[in-house]
Image (cartoon, rainbow, N blue to C red):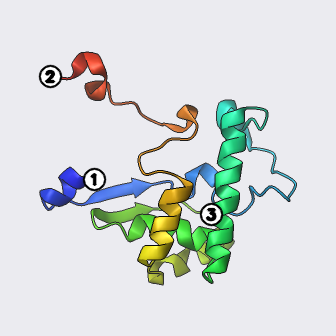
């Protein structure tokens, strides 16, 4: 992201709701949703017996409280977080239904202040992937063996 910004390039991000984790359905006090057949193929991302997914649930809960405390939905905050990054040119949202779209569109008008951004960074440290199974692509050029130094 810093490289793109430094060279005046825009980044297109995807999955700002983290595969549904930031949709508001995944809460500690709620019945957790049964993953769809497509999501079931990605069992490691949704298996609540795994400690990393319990950590994701804790982070999701903290982010949901932060959003609520600041007068927005978790969906709005998650999408706005991606949209408000200076290197981001566009965010691919991918709603499945009209209701999903209606819940996501208000994020276009949300501006996150420094205090909210700082708190998000405290909840999930920038650059952290809580569950390695969530990484959709591992760039082989960034593996130690491929680095020049």
Mark 3 or 2, nearer chain start: 3
Give neighbour class at mark 2: few <14, some 14-19, many 20+ (Cα, 10 Å). few
How far separated are the C-alphas under marks 3 and 1?
22 Å
Q: Which residue is mark 1?
A: 1
- Mark 3–mark 2 Cα distance, whole angstroms, equals 38 Å
Q: Which mark is residue 137?
A: none
Q: Is residue 47 above or below residue 59?
A: above
Residue lying at 51% horizontally and 77% vertically, measured from the top left: 107
Does residue 42 appear anywhere in the picture?
no
Instruction: Say left or right for 10 vs 123.
Output: left
Residue occupied by mark 2 = 148
Q: Is residue 129 above or below residue 111?
A: above
Secondary structure at badge 2 equals loop
- What label sits on residue 63 in the rendered view? 3
User: Reading the chain from its start, which is encountered first: label 3 or label 1?
Assistant: 1
Q: Residue furthest left?
A: 7
Q: Position of residue 141 (x, y in %)?
A: 25, 26
Of callouts 1 and 2, which one flags the residue occurring earlier in the amino acid sequence?
A: 1
Quadrant of the rendered image containing residue 48 = top right
């Amino acid at each position: 992201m810093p490289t793109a910004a430094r060279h005046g390039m825009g980044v297109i991000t995807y999955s700002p709701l983290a595969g549904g984790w930031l949709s508001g359905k995944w809460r500690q006090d709620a019945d957790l949703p049964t993953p769809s057949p497509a999501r079931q193929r990605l069992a490691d991302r949704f298996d609540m017996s795994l400690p990393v997914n319990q950590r994701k649930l804790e982070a999701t809960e903290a982010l949901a409280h932060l959003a609520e405390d600041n007068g927005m939905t978790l969906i709005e905050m998650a999408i706005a977080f991606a949209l408000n990054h200076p290197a981001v040119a566009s965010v691919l949202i991918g709603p499945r239904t009209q209701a999903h779209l209606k819940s996501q569109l208000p994020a276009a008008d949300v501006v996150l202040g420094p205090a909210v951004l700082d708190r998000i960074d405290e909840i999930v440290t920038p650059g952290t992937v809580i569950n390695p199974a969530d990484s959709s692509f591992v760039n082989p050029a960034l593996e130690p063996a491929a680095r020049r130094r």
